[in-house]
Each structure stands twice: as C-alpha cells, then as structure tokens.
Image (spheres, grey):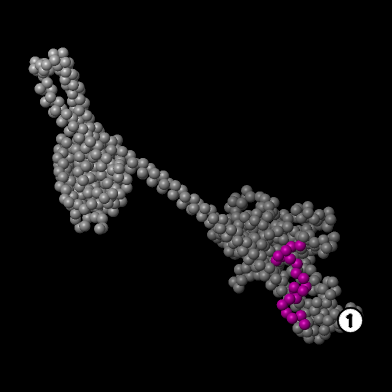
Amino acid sequence: MQPKGFERALGLGELLSGIGRETLAAELGRALGRPIAVTALTGETVLGEPTEAGEGVRRVPLRYDLEVVGYLQARECDEARLRALGRILEFFFQSSARYFLASELHLEVVQADFQALTHKHQSLVHSEARYKALAENLEARVKEQVGLIEDTQRQLYQAEKMASVGQLAAGVAHEINNPIGFIRSNLNTARSYVEKLATFRRTLKTQGVPQDWAWMEADLDFVLEDFRALLAESLSGAERVARIVADLKGFSAVDQAGQSSVDLNEQLRAVGDIAATQIRGCAELVLDLGPLPAVRCQPGQLNQVFLNLLLNALQAVEGRGQIRIATDVRDHQIRIRIADTGRGIPEAILPRIFEPFFTTRAVGQGTGLGLTVSRDIVVAHGGRIEVESRVGAGTTFTVWLPVAPD
Amino acid sequence: MAECDKASRKITIKLVYYGPALSGKTTNLTRLHDLLAPDLKGEIMALETHDDRTLFFDLLPLGFRTPSDWLIKFKLYTVPGQVVHDATRKAVLSRADGVVFVADSQRSQGLNNSESFQNLEDNVRRVGLDFERLPLVVQFNKRDLSNIVSEEEMRARWGATPWPLTFASALSGPGVTQTFRTLAHAVYPDLDARFGLAARHGVGPDAFVSAVMGGAAHAA
C-alpha cells in the first residue's frame, strides 16, 4: 500500500519540475565544461543528451529521501566537480519536494476544511428544516388553541346571558303568577255563580212564573254585579300577562333576528318594565328619556347591556336609593346614562371592572363577565362605555353609540 | 500505519512529535538530526513561517539497511502546535506508528498541555487510530528553565497513566535521544508482529534501536 496525499513518493520528473530542463542541463554542462545527463533508475535520460555507457563516463548517484533516485553522468570530467553538481541537484530536489509536500498538504487541509464546512452546512440545513416544520406546526397549534379559547369564551358569554335571563325569570314568574292566581280564583267563583244561575232556572221551571223570593234567595243581584267586576278584573289580569310576554319578546328580540332599526327609548322602557318587579320596593326608577333618532342595531344584545347595567345599579343601591336612566344626543352621538345613588366603586378596582372574570360578588353570584360582555357588545356597535364613580355617592355608566348616517 | 513496499524492499515508519505551540517539537527534531548517526540521515525539511513557527510540519528522514538488505525508513514529523492548524495536525497524525507528546514543563503551561493532550486523543480517534494501543511517550521539555513543575510532581500527576515519561531540554540536548529511544522500543513489537523484523529481516529489538540511533544509541 502506497501512501497517498502529501506523503506519496515523488518521482524524478516531479523533483526536477519548475525550471526549464534544457536550460538547467546547459548551465550544468557549462559549469562542468562537459555535456551532462541525468538518468533515472530505469536508465531513461531525463535531463541532457543520452550518453553511451563506456570508457571515460563518470556518474554520481542522486539521492532524495535517503534513496538513490537517479544518476548524474558526464564523459571525461572532473569527478569532484561532478559530485558538487550532484549535491546541488540534490538541494534542488529537496526544494522541489518541499514545495510539493506543502502544496499537497495544503490541498488536503483545504479539502478537509471544506468537507467539515459542507457537513456543518448540511446539519444547519437539516436543523433549519426542523425549526421550520416546528414553526409551521406551532402556527397550527396556536390557531387550534385560539379556536378553543374563542369557543370557551362564547360559551362563557352564553352562560353570562343565561345568568341574566335566569335572574329575570324569577321576577317574571312572580309577575305572571300573580294575575294567573287571581284569574283562576275569579274563574272558580264564576263557576259557582253559574251554578246559582242554574238553580234559579230550575226554580223557574217548577214554579212556572218568575219568583221574586227565588231571585232574592239566590242573591242574584250580587252575583250579577260581582260577575261583571270579576270578568273585568280577569281581563285586565290577562292583559297584564300578555304585556309581560310582549316585553319579554321585545327584550330578547326573539322575533328580530339580526339588525333592525329601533328607538332605544322603547327598548329602555321595556327593560325597565322587565326589571320592574325587582326594582319595586328597592329603588326608585326615574326615566328621563330625550328624543332619539332610530338606531340600526341588534336590539336583543343592547337590551342585555341595559339590563346588566340596571341590575348592577340595583345591587349598588342596596335596597334604598334612586336609579336614573337618561338619554340624549351629544356631539352627534347617542348618550345613555344609567346612574345610581349607591355605594360606588373604590378607585383601586375601578380600572379593572371591565376585565373578564373580575367580580366583587360571592362565588356563584356572578360570572364576572357582565361588564366585559356589555363592553364587547357596545364596541361591536361602534360605541364605547364609560364609568364614573364616587364611593358613597354613586356610579354612572355612560354608553355612547354612533348615530347612523342618513 | 507503517508502509511496506515489497517491490523496492522498504518499510516506512512514521513517528509524530505532537504538543502545544512552542513546546519544542521542532527543537527535538533539530537535536535528533545533530545527535543521531544512523546509516542514512536526510536533511530536516522545515515548512515554517517567517517567525519560525511551524506552518505545516517539519520532516526528518532517518534510515538503515537490514541484514536482509531491506531499507527501514523512519519519517519523523512535527505538527504545528497552534490551535488554528487542527486540520494540518490531523493530516500529519494520520497513519502514525508512534507519537511523542512534547509538553512544556513551565508552571504557566499546564492548561495548554492538557488541552493539547486532549486534542491529541481526539485527533487520534478521528484519523482512525486506536488511542489505547498507539505507542506514546510523554516528554516534559524545557527542564533547563527555572519556573517549572518538579519531576516528582509530574510523576505524581502522570504516574497513573500507562505512558512512559521522559524529561528533556531539547535546546541543549539532554533527554532528547532517550525520548526517541523509548519510542523506538515502544513501536518495535507491533512492527515485528506485522513484518517479521526479527525472523525475516534479522533485526531484533536492540538492533532495531541501535541501528536507527547509530552512535547515539548509548548516549544520554
């Protein structure tokens, strides 16, 4: 096995490279005074003219790397001079070899460095691809998480809506139960009056002629009078139920999918009516409604906002105080103010009240989303919601909504 | 790995002087060129920069003829010690039959020595040699300087390692031939096993060492 690269054996041809061989041979011949020749171990002449071996030919060995690589020879020459020229050639070999070794090694090192760089480059490309894949994956996962959060948020908003509706339901049930109760009682009484009339009819049939005593006995004067009153009362009760149902429908806007053009004052009145049973006896509700232009909105959603603010105000007054709802148009915007004379909100928590899940109420009493949802709805309508409060004096929420362009 | 060229009846053995920058590897070779007297001795070929730092390597060829008329050729290389020339060090170390690690005895050079030794171990493995089996001699050079780690301390530190330790002052000479002799003895068994130096070529271990050292075989 022969060493490769910088350690490979160098031939005579390589050792003599770099200088014109004819010039070298001519100059060596001039120095010796005789033509010279350099022959390889194979006998081939590599420098000068081939010399016939024979009498008068002298030759000296030429060494490189401890070994004889060729001969310098000339006819009938001074041996000491020939030997000196041989040494000079050997120096020349050494110098050539030095060049070859250095350049071969340099080449090896450059190739090794290049390979190392290529390898490094490949691993960089590989890791770049990995990070790219990871980044793409990350995007998908973030999207997935955002979707999950949005879903949860929607569910929470829905839950908040249900909570407000639940609060309403108790009041509404009571409100409806009351007229239903007295209507039922009236109908029972009416049934007994019908019995009395039937008895009177039987008496008429057996006696044949009208009997004053029978009329008197059945107390039909009273029955007629009371029947009339009872029917009137029941009718008004039924009307009350019908009105409540109408208010509820208006509040939830169940028959108004999407946007419609409404008078917000009507909506505020409906909300006031809906909450009336809860307000009654706890606070005085004052409506100060100025004329408003019609607004295109989602009435069900805005009603939720108004009810939220109204119920908050109701909680703030703690059973004694005034809630005032005022509307007007200011700077081409609709302004709705819901002010209470309640306990007020401490300054420290005022900036946080619109944060999701922020609540001062006991666990189970509120989701902490009421104001968050309210603000989102108002913002979705292109408006904003503001709050002013002083502890012990009361709180005013102001909803600003844009007036639709004509 | 030593090369065996049957056609031209020649075995070439490669020995490498390794170590941190400026620890005296080239000086070792220069001194060996002066002190050794084998049958055949070439000139040192130095490939250095203008400030005498080794750029590629230095090369000293030595040789002798066996009774069987084969040429046993030694090629003694140094590597460039500077950290940046690692690729060159690897190329030179490739196929080595034995290594002298030239450490700098000065107290300030402990870290350089150990980093270079670690580099030697890494590169030996990278060029496909077996570090556990590679003949290795550790030489503590520059014993002539004053601020050096004492021999006792060095022996205490390195005594547990499997490698022979030598102490030298390459600049003036002591220890240089002893280091070389120790390495020559260390590389012999493997060469003998592969090429039958004793059986086929009539060169026993002592003859092998004497032949390559010549007159210096018994010098200090």
Quarter assignment of residue B4? bottom right
Which amino acid does the dot numbered 1 rest on? Answer: Gly
Q: Is mark 1 on a helix, strand or loop?
A: loop
Quarter assignment of residue B127? bottom right
A389 with respect to A41 (left or right): left
Q: Does the magenta segment cover residue A317?
A: no
Question: The C terminus of chain B is located in which quarter?
Answer: bottom right
Residue drawn 20% across and 25% down? A187
The residue indicated by pointer 1 is A56
B140 shown above or below A297: below
Question: Which percent across, then down, holds residue A347?
Answer: 22, 47
A212 shown above or below A316: above
Residue drawn 36% across and 41% down? A155
Visible residue check, residue A80: no
Question: Which percent across, then down, holds residue A56?
Answer: 89, 81
Question: Which percent across, then down, holds residue A33?
Answer: 81, 86
Residue drawn 73% across and 79% down? A19
* Front residue of A81 and A359: A359
Residue drawn 18% across and 18% down? A198
Chain letter for the residue marked with disc 1 in the picture: A
* Front residue of A96 and A234: A234
B131 shown above or below A280: below
Visible residue check, residue A336: yes
Question: The N terminus of chain B is located in which quarter?
Answer: bottom right
Q: Does the magenta segment cover residue A5?
A: yes
A15 shown above or below A226: below
Q: Give the range drawn in magenta.
A: A2-22
